[in-house]
Image (cartoon, rainbow, N blue to C red):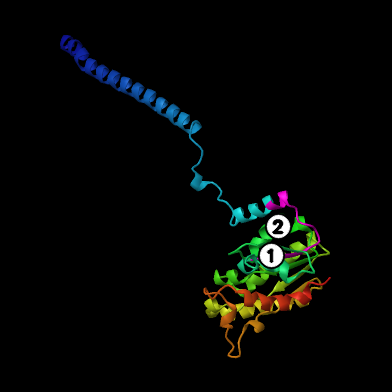
C-alpha cells in the first residue's frame, strides 16, 4: 500500500505544476502588454496636436469692420472733439453726412447689421480714441428684429450710456429713435415700446438726448412714407436722409 501511494504522488503533482507555470507565463505577458499600452497612451497624450480650429475661440462679430476703422485711424487720425455718428447701416449708408452738416466736424463709424451691444463691445476702438463732444447713436432695429425685447434694448442702451459717462464725462449722447421700416412693420409695436423706454430714460439723464424721428417718417395714414425708402423697404434713400438732416441738425450745436 505504501509503495503504491508513494509511486502515484508525482503523477498527480506534475500536471498541476505545469498548469501553474503556464498561467504564470501568461500573466507576465499580460503585465508587459499592459505596461506597453499605458506608455503608448502617455506618449500619444504628450504628442497630441493642438485642438482643432473649430474648438478655438471664434472671431468676434464685425471684427473686420472695426479693424478697417482702426487701420484708417492710423494713417489718417481724425480730429478729436468732433460729432461722432455711430450705429447700424442707417448710419453707415449716410454718405452725405459731412455735406449735410458743414458747420460741424463729423465722423461716421457706422457698421451695417450691428446692434447696440456691438457699439458697447467696440467702444474702446471706435469711440474713446476720438474724444467726441457729441455721440449720435442709431441702433436698436436689428436688436428687435433679432428677437430682443424692448427691455433688453433699453438695457443695452443703458450700458452704452454708462460707458460713455464713465470714460467721457463731458461727452453728450443723442439717441435717434428706431425708425418705422416698412419691411419690418410687423415689429412696430416692439419698436414703439423700445423707443418709449429709451426716451423715458434719457429724460432723467442730463447728458442724454432723444431725437424722435419715428412720427416724422409716417404718412397721413399712419404707415411709413413709401417715398423715403429704397427698394428694399428697409434703408432710406436721399429723401429719407434729407428728412433726418433737418431733425438732427438742431441737436448738434454745443
Q: Is residue 46 shown left or right of residue 75?
A: left
Rendered view: 137 above or below 29: below
Q: Which residue is mark 2?
A: 126
Tell me the quarter of the picture where residue 226 sits.
bottom right
Rendered view: 53 above or below 154: above
In magenta stretch: residue 17: no
Please state which of residues 42 and 72 is positioned toward the viewer in this rendering: 72
Q: From the top left corner, tell me how far across and down residue 175 is, in percent.
A: 71, 72
- Identify the mark at residue 86; answer none if there is no mark: 1
In magenta stretch: residue 77: yes
Q: From the top left corner, tell me how far across and down residue 35 is, in percent.
A: 42, 25
Rendered view: 64 above or below 102: above
Query: What range of the chain is rendered magenta?
Result: 72-87
Q: Is residue 188 shown left or right of residue 97?
A: left
Instruction: Judge the density around disc 1: few (<14), some (14-19), many (≥20) Cα neighbours within 10 Å.
Output: many
Q: Residue at x 66, y 67 (%)?
A: 156
Q: Residue at x 64, y 55 (%)?
A: 66
Asked if the residues shown at circle 1 and circle 2 are in contact, with their CB atoms under 8 angstroms apart, the answer is yes
Q: From the top left corner, tell me how far across and down residue 171 is, in percent.
A: 80, 65
Please state which of residues 12 and 34 is positioned toward the viewer in this rendering: 34
Instruction: Judge the density around disc 2: few (<14), some (14-19), many (≥20) Cα neighbours within 10 Å.
Output: many
Tell me the quarter of the picture where residue 195 sits.
bottom right
Q: Residue at x 71, y 66 (%)?
A: 85
Amino acid at each position: 500500500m505504501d509503495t503504491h501511494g508513494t509511486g502515484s504522488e508525482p503523477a498527480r503533482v506534475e500536471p498541476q505544476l505545469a498548469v501553474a507555470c503556464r498561467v504564470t507565463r501568461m500573466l507576465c505577458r499580460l503585465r508587459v502588454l499592459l505596461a506597453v499600452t499605458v506608455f503608448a497612451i502617455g506618449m500619444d497624450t504628450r504628442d497630441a496636436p493642438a485642438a482643432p480650429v473649430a474648438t478655438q475661440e471664434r472671431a468676434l462679430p464685425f471684427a473686420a469692420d472695426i479693424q478697417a476703422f482702426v487701420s484708417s485711424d492710423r494713417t489718417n487720425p481724425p480730429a478729436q472733439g468732433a460729432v461722432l455718428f455711430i450705429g447700424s447701416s442707417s448710419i453707415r449708408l449716410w454718405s452725405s453726412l459731412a455735406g449735410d452738416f458743414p458747420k460741424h466736424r463729423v465722423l461716421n463709424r457706422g457698421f451695417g447689421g450691428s446692434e447696440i451691444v456691438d457699439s458697447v463691445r467696440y467702444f474702446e476702438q471706435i469711440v474713446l480714441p476720438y474724444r467726441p463732444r457729441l455721440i449720435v447713436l442709431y441702433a436698436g432695429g436689428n436688436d428687435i428684429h433679432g428677437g430682443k425685447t424692448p427691455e433688453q434694448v433699453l438695457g443695452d442702451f443703458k450700458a452704452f450710456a454708462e460707458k460713455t459717462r464713465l470714460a467721457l464725462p463731458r461727452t453728450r449722447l443723442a439717441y435717434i429713435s428706431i425708425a418705422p421700416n416698412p419691411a419690418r412693420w410687423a415689429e412696430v409695436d416692439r419698436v414703439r415700446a423700445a423707443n418709449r423706454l429709451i426716451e423715458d430714460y434719457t429724460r432723467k439723464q442730463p447728458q442724454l438726448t432723444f431725437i424722435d424721428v419715428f412720427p416724422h417718417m409716417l404718412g397721413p395714414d399712419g404707415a411709413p412714407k413709401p417715398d423715403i425708402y429704397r427698394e428694399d423697404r428697409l434703408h432710406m434713400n436721399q429723401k429719407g436722409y434729407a428728412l433726418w438732416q433737418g431733425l438732427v441738425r438742431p441737436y448738434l450745436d454745443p
